[in-house]
Amino acid sequence: MRTVILRSSDGADHIVSSEAASLSRTVQSLLEELEAKEGEESPLIVPLPNVCDCTLRKVLQYCIQHTEPGTNLTGRIHVSETRRRDLEVWDRNYMLVSTDELYHLVMAAHYLNVPGLLELCCEGIANLIRGKSPQHVRQHFGLVNNFEKAEEEDIRRTNLWALVDEKELAKK
Amino acid sequence: MITSPDQGLSNIACNLLSLPEHILSEILKHIDIDGLSALAQTCRVFFHLAGSPSLWQQCPYYRHRSEDLLSLAARLCLSRALHLPPQAFRIDDDMGRSLKFPVAIPLFNLRRLLCSPHVDEFSDRAASAITDQIGRASWRRAQNRDASLWPADIFLFVRSDRFSMRFALRASTATHVMLLDLHRFRWPTRACAEEARAEYLLNRKVQESPLLAKGALPAMKTDHMWAFFDIYCTKPSTKANDQVSKPKVTMLAHVQGLKDVVATRDSLQKAAKQLVALLGWTNMNLHTAYDNVERWLGPVEELCLQVGSKDVELLLHLRRIKRVLRVSAKLVVKDVVPGQDSLCRNRIAQKRLCLPNYGCEHGCILRRGGPLS
């Protein structure tokens, strides 16, 4: 198994197997280019200027976990039921990070093009939004209410149909 | 792995709105309707992102117990047709002004969304566009493999009325409403379906059309409804059928506290059959159909009244079915076969419908929004 060195924006090097690194499509295409240029003998160093060390380490944890024996690169098609369940638990624990870290992970997953991780992060952010009132969402994510007063009331009224509880309350 | 000392996250400011728009859209795909509605109220960016029609196509109907299913269906199919978020529409049940066009959708509130004050113009164009879509229904049904609802599934005619659009209902909408109401009243129940042959049949059909089991209107295509009534409204001609249908009706009667099980079964079966017949309603006199349905639903209504206040909901449900049918029955429309003299036939249909008129060069009268489909 060939190893590659992934260099983060702050110059930290991470040695990983090419299999794990290839989970990122961006890295995979870079590797192909480098291999063509430098041949198979020399060590391959892939610079990743858009990913900081801390985030890269986290991304690599995901890649290594998801390339362990029994998993395949794309879809976990051949994964056994037990292994799949273990991975789900691992993913859940992996997502126990701060909101800031989650944003960085999403950006990194997007830049590195790791579909599984991107999906997982999107779901993680969606979980943070789910079940919250507009005020809570604003508070949690630091969003600024840029509606005018009348506009806000209008939007609130148009969205009543979807919010069953509020609508029932309004009826009462 | 070579590790460097933890230098922490990069100092680049990162918040939810700093994420690219397509990632935000990806995030919104994981959020349910409540979440989308809440998010739409937070700021302008999310108001526009959460309003994307693609996020609202698989809207489950059964969570909206308090909203009229018909309004909901109208909302969703308009969203699909006009590429606007479904919550933007205000559906008015306006039978006072026109029984032929009982559903009115005012468009005043879309001014901001459309960034144009000329909603009358939009209304005119949208009516033409939807009429066109309804006209091309057969071609689209052949092409369309997804389970979403199209305007032609619900509406028969659309016309613009200054700042609003008015819709005439398709007669088969009554079937949708009744079918969903029956589902809503848990008839036939899962417990019933578990019995004997019915379970096998149901499972088989459900596998073929998984959305049917969830009671989602978008999946209620004509074949599904036929399959449904095949199973649950079997003709009581053989003993075997009676054995299958009896427990279901008994359960319904038990749930609703009805005494006369046989009458309940017969009435519901006949009503359902009649409503199904409305699906292929070409050349059918809807007045007769309505009279029949009313006659058959009558005994159930009487039973409800006898039982007392406990069954007010069932009674209301029956009355709603009847109301929809009454509206449909006003549309005594027969399909006009397209041919050489289609314009003149349109004229005949026009007279029957008493629709708003437009003169044409042939001296015939054409319906606004295009020829009859």
Image (spheres, rainbow, N blue to C red):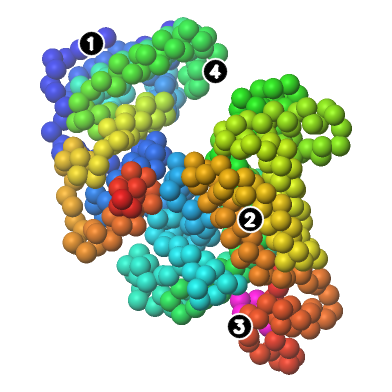
For label 3, the residue is B356
Query: Which mark identifies residue A77?
Result: 4
Task: Examine the structure image and report whether residue B117 is included in the region drawn in magenta.
Answer: no
Do badges 2 and 1 share one subunit?
yes
Residue type pointed to by label 2: Ala
Q: Position of residue B345 (x, y in %)?
A: 79, 79
Q: Is residue A129 left or right of residue B97?
A: left
Residue B306 against residue B328 in the figure, above or below: above
Q: Nearer the viewer, residue B66 or B155?
A: B66
Residue located 72% across and 27% down the image: B198
For label 1, the residue is B2
Q: Which residues are magenta?
A: B366-370
Chain under label 3? B
The mark lying in front, picked from 4 and 2, is: 2
Q: CA distance from mark 3 to mark 1?
A: 79 Å
Residue A98 against residue A93 in the figure, above or below: below
Q: Nearer the viewer, residue B367 or B68?
A: B68
Considering only order in the chain, which callout, 1 or 2, is on the residue closer to the N terminus?
A: 1
